[in-house]
Amino acid sequence: MTRIVLATRNPGKITELRAILTAARPDYDLVGADAYPEVPDVKETGVTFAENALLKAHALAQATGLPAVADDSGLCVDVLNGAPGIFSARWSGRHGDDRANLDLLLAQLTDIDDAHRAAHFACAAALALPDGTERVVEGRLLGTLRHAPVGDGGFGYDPILQPLGDTRTCAQLTAEEKNAISHRGQAFRALVPVVRELVG
């Protein structure tokens, strides 16, 4: 069984990625970066989602000698010219503080009418091999932003993004419903044939 390392220590993201990739290809042994505690986290110094995903995937592939999959994703708000974008996880100044990030964003949008609350989740998913081979694919989930969080599923900005065509937020969707339409689901399903081609 081929082992592939997922370049994240976020348990919510590991569960999500495992579900997406395993559904498409159950014969891979998918492990999170927490299986390699000696490998340091990579600083996201890129200026795009794709650059950050590649930085993480290459670092893990080099450190472990295994194929590595990484993603970088975030929320892009139209009226904020695409922000928070690559800074989504640290928008409040504290990396990974979902509630603080969400509260700050909502405060910044207090006076914005519903007609101007368009936003989308974006994801770049990268595969890197130890020999330096790399590929990147992308996905998007279009929606609008609620004025207050609704739902207790998912993570990050899920409680405020309502996908187009739905009346619920991403945090109200089941894991299966979310994976079927999410930016991450789209990107990782697009990555599956790339993994098959390059990893086998």
Image (cartoon, rainbow, N blue to C red):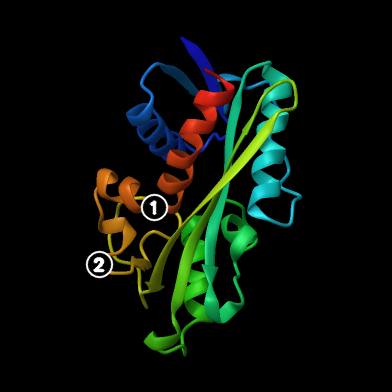
Q: Nearer the viewer, residue 76 or 91?
A: 76
Quadrant assignment, res 164: bottom left
- Residue 160, horizontal then vertical, whole percent: 38, 67
- Residue 116, horizontal then vertical, whole percent: 45, 85
Label 1 – label 2 distance at C-alpha: 13 Å
Give me the residue at 73% from left, 57% from top: 47
Quadrant assignment, res 132: top right
Asked which secondary structure carries label 1, the reply is loop
Which residue in the structure is indicated by mark 2?
166
Q: In the figure, is residue 185 to the left or right of 51? A: left
- Local packing at callout 1 (Cα closer than 10 Å; few below 14, some 14-19, many 20+) is many
- Residue 187, horizontal then vertical, whole percent: 48, 45
Q: Amino acid at mark 2?
A: Asp
Q: Nearer the viewer, residue 164 or 159?
A: 164
Asked which secondary structure carries label 2, the reply is loop
Name the N-terminal-most of marks 1 and 2: 2
Q: Nearer the viewer, residue 163 or 152?
A: 163
Which residue in the structure is indicated by mark 1?
182
Query: Can I make out residue 78 in this image?
Result: yes
Q: In the figure, is residue 24 to the left or right of 192? A: left
Q: Amino acid at mark 1?
A: Ser
200 w.r.t. 117: above or below:
above
89 w.r.t. 115: above or below:
above
- Residue 118, horizontal then vertical, whole percent: 44, 77
Give me the residue at 67% from left, 27% from top: 60
The tag on residue 156 is none
199 w.r.t. 169: above or below:
above
Give me the residue at 64% from left, 37% from top: 135
